[in-house]
Structures are given as C-alpha cells and as structure tokens.
Amino acid sequence: MDEPQKRRVALKVLGATLGASAFAYAMAPVRKWAAGLSVDQFLQRHYRELTKEELAPILRRLEAKAKADYGRDVVIRDPDPLEGAEFGYALNLSVCIGCRKCAEACHVENNHDRTTNNSYIRVLEMEQGSFDMERGDATYEHAVPAPGKYYLPVQCQQCDNAPCVTVCPVQATWKEPDGIVVVDYDWCIGCRYCEAACPYHARRFNWQKPEIPAEEINPDQSYLSNRVRPQGVVEKCHFCLHRTRVGRNPACLEACPTGARVFGNLADPSSDIRWVLENRRVYVLKEELGTHPRFFYFFEK
C-alpha cells in the first residue's frame, strides 16, 4: 500500500483546487467535527498502518466515547476478512414487494440517526419493463405491491472498480480482500468526492451528530461498519461486516419477508449466491460504466 497522504496535506490541495470561498463552505462541517478531536486523534495513523496492538486502545477510546455521548455500553470489534471469502449479494426482483423492511433493518442495525430516518438502502418503485434506476420513485407512500410496478432496492454495489475509492484524496475508503468497500471514519475528511463519484447514490454524508436514544443503540459494533459515525464524514453500506465476517447474514437479508435476498461467498462453488449466478439471468446496475458490481439482480423468468 502506498503511504496515505496526511490529512492536512489533502486539505491544502483541496483548498487550492476549490478556491478560498468554496473551500471554506465545503469544509464548514469538517471544522465543526475536527474541533472536537484531540491532537492525537486528528493525527491518528491510517487504519491499514495500525497493528492490532495499536488499534486496541483506539477501540477502547471509541467505546468510552459512545458511553459518554449516548449513555450505552458498547463493544467495538475489528473482525478480519474471512480467508478465502469473496462476498456477493443477489436480489430476486420477482418476489420483492417494496415493503422496505430491509431499509428499516439497516437503519436499526447500523445505528443511523433517528431524526433523518437514514438507511443505506433505497427502495425504488419501478415501471414493469424498465430497468433505469434514475426513473424510479423512492418516495412512494401507497400500499405495496402496486399493479404494474416492481421494486428495486439499491445500496452500495461493492464495486471491484469503485469510482468512490479512486477519487478519495486521502485513501479513507478502499476495497478489502473479501470484496467489501469500507470507510475509515476517523480518516475521512468529509470532502464528499466519493459521494459525488458514486453512480448508485449509495453514500451518505453526516451533516450533524447522529441522534439515537440509548435504548436503541445496537451495542454490537465494528470499527469499519456500524459504530456511530461522527459528524462530517461520509458513510455507506458495508455488507454488515460485523455480522458477515463471523458467519451471520446481513440484517437486511434476515428482515426480508419474501426471501428475495441472497448473500454468500462467490468463491464457494456450493454457495447460494453461486447457484443464482449460474442458474439465473442476472443483471447489474449501469453495466456500461464498468464498475463491476458485486451486487446482482435477477427475475425468476
């Protein structure tokens, strides 16, 4: 790995690129966030440069901060990618009914801000015969499923050629060996280049400190996944790596009432996800862009 650029260097480059006034506007949320950091926290080395021994006190500090900020005891782990695992996801559009139970489960599992009702999943209502996600309606409020419609849940596609990774000026986001694109929330400078680069609208910017009642905090957390994200950073779906790296399914899959979601190891010939890829006609969103997603869609017929 090339040595990551220091955040202060990246901020200088960003300022020179945008100009003084635009830079000041863009960095306002970041200044507010950074003001609450100690010098040691701000100068913390990149995640991939830290040994397990060096990361351990950082995890304990974050647990103490969660207790102080939200009044809840949490455990923040750092599970390694499983050896030989290459995660992929598939979704059966023939049986998805647009109920948004997946988005709700994501909201709860990943400690999203309750005020904004954020989630990493958007469910688009689509006209039958169309596969253009830009024409989908994510704001429908009527009973589902509606006649003449089908439903297209969209989240991070965990692209092998991820444009969000390419544009990050400080290498705060990268692809792990198991195929999951992750974010180091302690390294992100909040420039939002990744958010603009993502063709699937899968990244979210934390404009404010998340508000979550103590009793609603999910205490089972991971450094690279569902720990409460600070203000001023970009976040995204991570295939619930705090679950999937220890042999569990993503929360959205467990919440689906119709069994539309299939998750598994693409490197395992006997996995359910491989069966889908080998026996169904699968689609990926915006294939023409060459992002090579690990998220697939299919119909029964």
Image: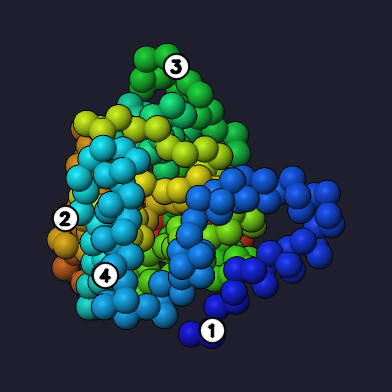
- The residue under label 3 is 141
Q: Amino acid at mark 1?
A: Glu
- Residue 276: in sight, yes or no? no
Q: Are marks 2 and 4 in contact (CB under 8 Å)?
A: no
- x then y, percent, for residue 293: 46, 61
Which comes before the other along the chain, label 1 or label 3? Answer: 1
* Cα separation between marks 2 and 4: 24 Å
Looking at the image, is mark 1 or mark 3 nearer the viewer? 1
Left/right of residue 105 with respect to residue 37 in the rendered view? left
Local SS, label 1: loop
Q: Residue furthest bottom?
A: 2
Q: Earlier in the sequence, mark 1 or mark 2?
A: 1
| Residue type beneath disc 4 | Ala
Mark sitting earlier along the chain (2/4): 4
Image coordinates for residue 37, horizontal then vertical, percent = 49, 56
- Residue 12 lies, in percent from the top left, at 73, 67
Q: Amino acid at mark 3?
A: Glu
Residue 245: image quadrant is: bottom left
Can you give x and y, in whole percent of width and height, for residue 286 in the image? 56, 54
Tag nearer the camera, 3 or 2: 2
Disc 2 target residue: 248
**Alpha carbon of mark 3 to alpha carbon of mark 2: how far?**
32 Å
Dots 4, 3 in contact, CB < 8 A: no
Contact flag, marks 1 and 2 (Cβ < 8 Å): no
Q: Residue at x 48, y 33 (%)?
A: 124
In the picture provided, is 150 more to the left or to the right than 227? right
Identify the residue under disc 1.
3
Spatial CA span between label 4 and label 3? 45 Å
Cα separation, mark 1 vs mark 3, equals 48 Å
Which label sits in the foreground, 1 or 2?
1
Q: Which mark is residue 56?
A: 4
Image marks 3 and 2: residues in contact by CB distance under 8 Å: no
